Amino acid sequence: MRGNLLKKILAGLMSAALLAVPALAAEPQQPAAWAVSQLADSYALGLVDDNYTSYIESPVTMEQLESMTDVVAAKLALLELDQRTADAVGLVVDTTRGGVMNALYQEAAAYELPGVEKGTTAFLTSLGVVKGGSAGDLALERTCTYQEAMVMANRLILAVYDQQDAGSKGLLWKATNGDNTLYLLGTIHLDRDNVYPLHKSLRDAIQASEEVIFELDLNDQEGIALLQSMQTYSDGTTLADHISPELYQRVQTAAAALGMGADALDLYKPWALASTFSTLSMMDDSTSTNAMAIDSYVNAAAVNSGKAIGAVETYAFQGGIFDGLSAEYQEAYLDAALSALEASLSGTTSSEVEEGLQQQEEMLSGMFAAWKDRDPAAFSQVYDKAAIINSTDELNSKLFTERDPGMIQAAAKYLETEGSHTYFMAVGAGHMVDPGGIVSGLKELGYTVELVL
């Protein structure tokens, strides 16, 4: 699994994988318009994968249906609802639409949910999981396509979570100026701690906005290509020419452990590998092969809904932050990141590295817990931005001190747009909180900024 993720990250695929049609031997299948709005959540939840265009319109198989119901079961179990004895008598599970509905209903019927005792059709239609055609016909006997099953499974998870007021709320603020509204989401550039599905208030804020703004335009193919070029050497040298022989050998060993060829990473610069290894070491058991970072989810949801996309920074600027690091810092950065990855791969490490990994895990778990609860105070307690900014680390000032003012100005510009508009800005949570964060920066400029309740 990590080998595939490594390739994704190194390829610079910062936009959601489901938005790009992969090269396939057969002509790709495109989801129907009514299914497109479900793709972001379906991908994040694990109901589809990167190869969805090879099967999305095909009849669902029993194996695929079983995989979907496993996803539904796992997500509903996280809610820790009161259980009940599910009555499965007479429920036929097969690959017809009715059979798929029965399979999904059985997962929900294991819990005390409002209306669940009324049976498959009544329960699922009441939640909007199935809606039928223009005449209201549910076509229960017709063979079910994968996208139909996917949409039903996705709708069921979201409907139950919404009914329970559950889901990750995110660090979400609402800034206003006259008739203009700017939602501010502090993101974490990872997928872990069962972060999906997101709370309805967060999903609704995305959909209510006419433009969604990120640190970078995650759909800018020229920018992504530029970042890819900045990650690799173009002067005829390789990684071995820029780091110690010992560190280079460790990279080779790690590449082999991740299922890659011995020389597969030779063209990448130390900072690119360090960033990638760090990301891999920060994942947990809930991270699937999809690994959809929160920013990528927001991007997919926005693009699939036809929203305009904006960016605060450029790939040249953000890539230059890392590419401009000193050679000494890049080597030390790679050494530290690789040590963490080696420990997670082998399960054995030195006491010093083990202590560092434990601190990292505690910080990440605390950050995600606060993020999911929409608790910026708790987030700031775990994520000590002041200590980060005041450290002597070469990278820290570049990441925050040199960037936060520009993000505040960008946010203010949207609030000053003539007319009545609603925008959504999603950037790293570290840029939202103090010292020097966007939230307090906008307040100091006189705008009203409140945490979304």
Image (tube, helix red, strand yellow):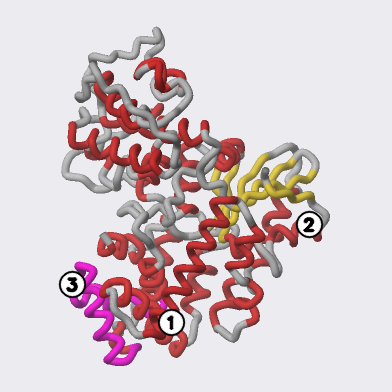
Q: Quadrant of residue 346?
A: bottom left
The relative height of residue 264 versus residue 303 in the rendered view (above or below) is below
In the picture as drawn, the residue positioned furthest to the right comes out as 446
Residue at 43%, 82% (x, y): give it: 333
How far separated are the C-alphas under marks 2 and 1?
36 Å
Q: x%, y% of residue 213?
A: 58, 51
In the picture as drawn, the residue positioned furthest to the top comes out as 135
- 31 in the magenta segment: no
Q: Which residues are magenta?
A: 242-271
Residue at 20%, 73% (x, y): give it: 256
Q: x%, y% of residue 422?
A: 67, 40
Q: x%, y% of residue 124?
A: 40, 21
- Which one is earlier in the sequence, the residue at label 3 or at label 2? 3
Q: Residues within 10 Å of mark 3 (few under 14, many from 20)?
A: few
Residue at 23%, 69% (x, y): give it: 258
Residue beneath label 3, please? 261
SS under mark 1: helix
Residue beneath label 1, please? 333
* Amino acid of disc 2: Lys
Q: Nearer the viewer, residue 127 or 313?
A: 127
Q: Quadrant of residue 381?
A: bottom right
Which of the two discs, 3 and 1, sits closer to the camera? 1
Residue at 32%, 72% (x, y): give it: 344
Residue beneath label 2, please? 443
Q: Nearer the viewer, residue 372 or 8?
A: 372
- 259 in the magenta segment: yes
The relative height of residue 27 versus residue 265 in the rendered view (above or below) is above
Quarter that holds the N terminus = bottom left
* Amino acid of disc 1: Tyr
The relative height of residue 59 versus residue 217 in the rendered view (above or below) is above
Q: x%, y% of residue 43?
A: 36, 44
